[in-house]
Image (cartoon, rainbow, N blue to C red):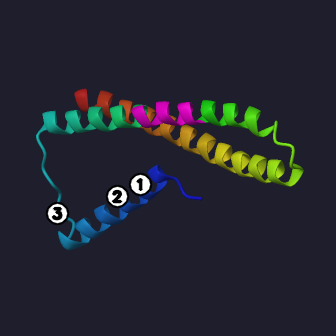
Amino acid sequence: MGTVVHHLWERSKKAAGTSADANQGEAVQMPPGAIRDQIVVTAGTCEILSRSVEALQKNLKRLDSIVCMIDDLETRQKLQHQMKTIDASLLRESASLRFQIELLQSLGRLHVL
């Protein structure tokens, strides 16, 4: 199961590569304020996604406590396996988002200099 953020990241890399190929490596000039604003907006979006992932993890734990009450062993195990897979994906996404937020904050500090 792929994650939304991963798909968006991959799509943005493809778009950037296609755009660079089309422009034959021409750099796009942006005013410093616009770059700083874009960094802040992107970091904010990553923080919102990070909080959403945390909420999903909490809800998944609540769901697990409900699934434990299912009498049908096969159904319970199947659901627990699916939730374990989802939890692992959320953990990876959370780590990736924390890294991206730190990177964007560092870029923002460098850009201010």
Secondary structure of the residue carrying numbered label 1: helix
Provide the residue designation for mark 2: 12
Please give the name of the residue rendered at 75% of the width and 32% of the height, measured from the top-left corner.
65
Nearer mark to the viewer, of 3 and 2:
2
Secondary structure of the residue carrying numbered label 3: loop
- How packed mark 1 is, by other alpha carbons closer than 10 Å (few <14, some 14-19, many 20 or more), is few
Q: Whole-Å distance between the Cαs marked 2 and 1? A: 5 Å
Magenta residues (range): 48-56
- The kind of residue tagged 3 is Glu
- For the residues labelled 3 and 1, say whether their Cβ atoms are less than 8 Å apart: no
- The kind of residue tagged 1 is Trp
Which of the two labelled residues, at mark 3 and mark 1, occupies the earlier sequence position?
1
Task: State the predominant SS element of the stretch in magenta.
Answer: helix
- For the residues labelled 2 and 1, say whether their Cβ atoms are less than 8 Å apart: yes
Quadrant location of residue 58?
Answer: top right
Q: Is any atom of residue 17 visible in this view?
A: yes
- How packed mark 3 is, by other alpha carbons closer than 10 Å (few <14, some 14-19, many 20 or more), is few
Q: Whole-Å distance between the Cαs marked 3 and 2? A: 18 Å
Left/right of residue 62 with respect to residue 111 in the rendered view: right
Q: Position of residue 75 (x, y in %)?
A: 81, 52
Tell me the quarter of the image containing the N terminus.
bottom right
Is residue 113 part of the magenta span, yes or no?
Answer: no
Q: Position of residue 37 (x, y in %)?
A: 21, 33
Q: Looking at the image, which is closer to me, 6 or 39?
A: 6
Provide the residue designation for mark 3: 26
Is residue 52 part of the magenta span, yes or no?
Answer: yes
* Res. 9 mark: 1
Q: Is any atom of residue 113 visible in this view?
A: no
- The kind of residue tagged 2 is Ser
Q: Whole-Å distance between the Cαs marked 3 and 1? A: 22 Å
